[in-house]
Amino acid sequence: MKQDERSSHEAIRRSAERMRARRRRPGDSPLRGLSLFGAIGWSVATPTVGGALLGLWLNRVAPAGFSWPVALMLGGLVIGILVAWEWVARESRAAQDESPAQPDKESRDG
Protein backbone atom coordinates (compact mmCIF):
# COMPACT_ATOMS: atom_id res chain seq x y z
CA MET A 1 0.00 0.00 0.00
CA LYS A 2 1.22 3.50 -0.73
CA GLN A 3 1.81 6.09 1.95
CA ASP A 4 -1.15 8.21 0.74
CA GLU A 5 -3.51 5.24 0.91
CA ARG A 6 -2.33 4.36 4.42
CA SER A 7 -2.83 7.91 5.66
CA SER A 8 -6.30 7.98 4.08
CA HIS A 9 -7.23 4.70 5.75
CA GLU A 10 -5.91 6.00 9.05
CA ALA A 11 -7.89 9.24 8.73
CA ILE A 12 -11.08 7.31 7.97
CA ARG A 13 -10.45 4.98 10.91
CA ARG A 14 -9.94 7.92 13.30
CA SER A 15 -13.07 9.63 12.00
CA ALA A 16 -15.13 6.46 12.49
CA GLU A 17 -13.76 6.05 16.01
CA ARG A 18 -14.75 9.63 16.90
CA MET A 19 -18.25 9.03 15.51
CA ARG A 20 -18.59 5.85 17.58
CA ALA A 21 -17.46 7.69 20.71
CA ARG A 22 -20.02 10.47 20.11
CA ARG A 23 -22.81 7.93 19.69
CA ARG A 24 -21.83 6.18 22.93
CA ARG A 25 -21.87 9.41 24.94
CA PRO A 26 -23.82 12.29 23.42
CA GLY A 27 -23.12 15.79 24.69
CA ASP A 28 -24.80 17.13 27.78
CA SER A 29 -28.02 19.00 27.14
CA PRO A 30 -29.43 21.91 29.16
CA LEU A 31 -32.23 19.63 30.36
CA ARG A 32 -29.68 17.20 31.78
CA GLY A 33 -28.08 20.08 33.67
CA LEU A 34 -31.45 21.10 35.10
CA SER A 35 -32.19 17.54 36.16
CA LEU A 36 -28.81 17.28 37.90
CA PHE A 37 -29.46 20.58 39.64
CA GLY A 38 -32.86 19.28 40.79
CA ALA A 39 -31.43 15.98 42.02
CA ILE A 40 -28.79 17.77 44.06
CA GLY A 41 -31.41 20.13 45.47
CA TRP A 42 -33.67 17.28 46.53
CA SER A 43 -30.78 15.39 48.11
CA VAL A 44 -30.17 18.42 50.35
CA ALA A 45 -33.77 19.52 50.92
CA THR A 46 -35.23 16.12 51.84
CA PRO A 47 -33.03 15.38 54.90
CA THR A 48 -33.31 19.02 56.02
CA VAL A 49 -37.11 19.05 55.96
CA GLY A 50 -37.21 15.53 57.41
CA GLY A 51 -35.03 16.67 60.30
CA ALA A 52 -37.28 19.66 60.96
CA LEU A 53 -40.41 17.49 60.98
CA LEU A 54 -38.80 14.93 63.26
CA GLY A 55 -37.72 17.78 65.52
CA LEU A 56 -41.28 19.12 65.75
CA TRP A 57 -42.48 15.69 66.80
CA LEU A 58 -39.67 15.35 69.35
CA ASN A 59 -40.53 18.78 70.82
CA ARG A 60 -43.99 17.42 71.67
CA VAL A 61 -42.80 14.00 72.85
CA ALA A 62 -39.53 14.85 74.64
CA PRO A 63 -39.19 18.58 75.34
CA ALA A 64 -35.63 19.72 75.97
CA GLY A 65 -33.78 22.91 76.82
CA PHE A 66 -32.87 23.34 73.16
CA SER A 67 -34.88 23.35 69.95
CA TRP A 68 -35.13 19.88 68.42
CA PRO A 69 -36.28 21.20 65.01
CA VAL A 70 -33.29 23.51 64.65
CA ALA A 71 -30.80 20.86 65.77
CA LEU A 72 -32.20 18.16 63.51
CA MET A 73 -32.65 20.56 60.62
CA LEU A 74 -28.95 21.44 60.81
CA GLY A 75 -28.07 17.75 61.08
CA GLY A 76 -30.22 16.98 58.03
CA LEU A 77 -28.58 19.82 56.14
CA VAL A 78 -25.11 18.44 56.87
CA ILE A 79 -26.17 14.93 55.83
CA GLY A 80 -27.78 16.27 52.64
CA ILE A 81 -24.67 18.25 51.71
CA LEU A 82 -22.47 15.19 52.25
CA VAL A 83 -24.78 13.04 50.10
CA ALA A 84 -24.82 15.67 47.34
CA TRP A 85 -21.04 16.05 47.51
CA GLU A 86 -20.52 12.30 47.12
CA TRP A 87 -23.03 12.13 44.28
CA VAL A 88 -21.34 14.97 42.36
CA ALA A 89 -17.92 13.38 42.93
CA ARG A 90 -19.21 10.02 41.61
CA GLU A 91 -20.70 11.70 38.51
CA SER A 92 -17.45 13.56 37.92
CA ARG A 93 -15.41 10.34 38.15
CA ALA A 94 -17.82 8.62 35.75
CA ALA A 95 -17.53 11.48 33.26
CA GLN A 96 -13.74 11.33 33.41
CA ASP A 97 -13.77 7.57 32.89
CA GLU A 98 -16.01 7.89 29.85
CA SER A 99 -14.04 10.70 28.22
CA PRO A 100 -12.05 9.57 25.20
CA ALA A 101 -8.33 9.05 25.70
CA GLN A 102 -5.99 11.71 24.41
CA PRO A 103 -4.53 10.80 21.02
CA ASP A 104 -0.93 9.73 21.10
CA LYS A 105 1.84 11.69 19.44
CA GLU A 106 1.99 9.50 16.33
CA SER A 107 -1.66 10.07 15.38
CA ARG A 108 -1.32 13.84 15.93
CA ASP A 109 1.72 14.06 13.67
CA GLY A 110 0.07 12.61 10.85
Image (cartoon, rainbow, N blue to C red):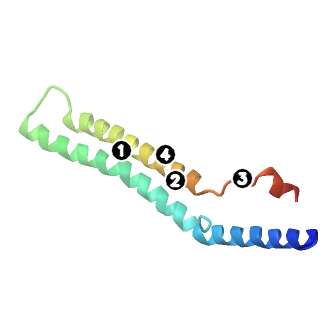
Of mark 3 and mark 2, the one earlier in the sequence is 2
Helix, strand or loop under label 2: helix
Q: Which mark is residue 80?
A: 1
Horizontally, is 95 left or right of 77 in the view?
A: right
Q: Position of residue 75 (x, y in %)?
A: 29, 36
Circle nearer the viewer, 1 or 2:
2
Residue type for callout 4: Ala
- Vertical placement of residue 6 versus 64, above or below: below
Q: Amino acid at mark 1?
A: Gly
Q: Earlier in the sequence, mark 1 or mark 2?
A: 1
Q: Looking at the figure, which quarter contains the N terminus? A: bottom right
Q: Work out whether mark 2 precedes mark 4 in sequence or the reverse, and give the earlier one.
A: 4
Circle 2 sits on which residue?
A: 94
Q: CA distance from mark 4 to mark 3?
A: 22 Å
Distance CA(mark 1)–CA(mark 2): 21 Å
Mark 3 vs 1, N-terminal side: 1
Position of 66 compared to 91: left or right? left
Which disc, if any, is residue 21? Answer: none
Q: Residues within 10 Å of mark 3 (few under 14, many from 20)?
A: few
Nearer the viewer's eye, disc 3 or disc 1?
Answer: 3
Examine the image and state in which quarter residue 21 appears: bottom right
Q: Mark 2, mark 4: which one is toward the viewer?
A: 2
Residue 18 in which image quadrant = bottom right
Give the crowd class for mark 1: few <14, some 14-19, many >=20 residues within 10 Å.
many
Of tags 4 and 3, which is closer to the observer? 3
Residue carrying label 3: 102
